Image: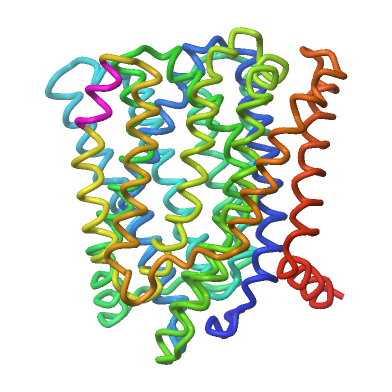
Amino acid sequence: MAKDTSSLSLGRETVIGMVGRVLLLISGFIEVLVLTRFLNPSTVGSFYVLLSAAEILCQVIDGTGVAIRKRVSEIGSSSSEYLGAGILFAITYSLLLGAIVGLVYWCTSGPLFGLTVSDSFGVIVTTLTLGLFSIAFDTYTGTGNPGAATIANAGRSLIRLLAVVGILSLTTMVPMLIWAVACANFLAFLLILFLLDIHPTLPSRETAYRTLSFARYSVPNKFLQRLYSRADILLLSALAGNAAAGFYEAALRLTIPSVTAAVVLARTLSVKTSGLASRAKEGVERELQQGTRFAGLFGFPLLAGSIVLGQDLLAVLYTPEYVRAWPALVGLALFQLIYTYRLQYTNVVDGLNQPEINFRVNVGIVIIFLPTATALTLTHGLIGILVATVSTEILRLGAYVYILRKDLGFPFEPMIVMQIISAAIMFLFLPFLSLQLVYGKLYNTTILILFGGLIYFSLLLILDSEIRFKMKKLIQEHR
């Protein structure tokens, strides 16, 4: 059921969405854990390289999904027509990709970029099913259900985990794992259609025009964003080997909890801002302030913890071989922290119906990132790609602050300072606590993580009266 998106509760939707994000993180982490136990780093890297290829190809559909989410979130829109338009586009685009790949194989009679026929068509089918899910997900989000949509996404991750485990019990062939992911995506698409309770219909000319008017920017934006975010692992695989890519991906999975609140906040901000803009209401700057207050809530302690406990965590969760991924863990934790703040700007800009701003920023960043990352990876390997990734994300956030400085600025809230202080104190205490425990044991590492979290959040509650007020308000809303 569609809601009045201009009156969405950021707190309520964030809490619901965080439940979904936690489930998503748990299932995603278990997947990586299972893969690293059954497969060597090179094979793990190959699997994620193929998934990255599918995700990059899917950005055209994802960009259309962003346009649909924007239009559906506007007051008085026809959700069924926008859903139908998205599904029709996803199928047409994937069939076109399949025809192009088939023609290339027929003309060359050889591997395409070193991929077999099974690999290539597995990637295309994964692109289709992921795209269908993305369209349904964005429609569900745009109707005023960002929190529930996140829980549905967690369901997709759980289905994918079960599919991967099932295939691993039979074979360790990477193409079969890719096909398992494709099947899981399609089942999740059917699930979210059931939750939507909307029958897709053929779009009218006006619906198609309004979708295209936004998609002309959101499609290249999504493609550029995914290229930027996944080019690192593709460059690592090509220039430093699949093992380096495997280390990088394993470390990345451990840093994802830092964006738990930020992703849900940003998605809700996009929908609410769109509702406010469609009614010509004020208050966008206030909503952005709310987003930035809580965006780095988990990012600061995770960065501190990755520096102190990172090597031990990698060894006990994966294998001792993965200790070599520690620099990647620290670097990616810093990247994710910066990303949490930048994400709020990106989504608010989309909600304000100004995707051209995102497009300009993305083009500039990709132009800078690709040659910089290539040069640094060739000379410094894994460390080089980390330096390029972190520095360009800082530049990206700075670009948004500069462009929007008159309208939105960068609301550096006192709560952010309190988060930094709390994380710094936790960072100082953890080494003393670790001296009392034996390294190399999972339960000891877990105890240290729990103690660190207890120190951080206890200090935050003591130092910041606003977060205490927010917690009381959320508890009252859920009674």
Q: Quadrant of the C terminus?
A: bottom right
Q: Is residue 365 above or below residue 429?
A: below
- Dominant secondary structure of the residues highlighted in magenta in the image: helix
Q: Quadrant of the N terminus?
A: bottom right
Look at the image and give the residue range highlighted in magenta: 371-378
Instruction: Judge from the rendering whether residue 267 lies leftward or rightward of residue 308; answer left or right.
Output: left
Q: Look at 48% across and 29% down and name the residue there.
A: 178
User: Residue 397, percent across and down?
Assistant: 37, 53
Q: Look at 24% across and 17% down and name the residue there.
A: 111
Q: Nearer the viewer, residue 33 or 94?
A: 33
Q: Look at 32% across and 32% down and name the residue there.
A: 388
To which quarter of the image does residue 170 belong?
Answer: top right
Q: Is residue 455 above or below residue 66?
A: above
Q: How many discs appear?
A: 0
Q: Residue furthest left?
A: 107
Instruction: Judge from the rendering whether residue 127 lies leftward or rightward of residue 371; answer left or right.
Output: right
User: Residue 378, percent across and down?
Assistant: 26, 15
Q: Is residue 377 magenta?
A: yes
Q: Look at 41% across and 63% down and name the residue there.
A: 345
Instruction: Judge from the rendering whether residue 314 lies leftward or rightward of residue 453; answer left or right.
Output: left
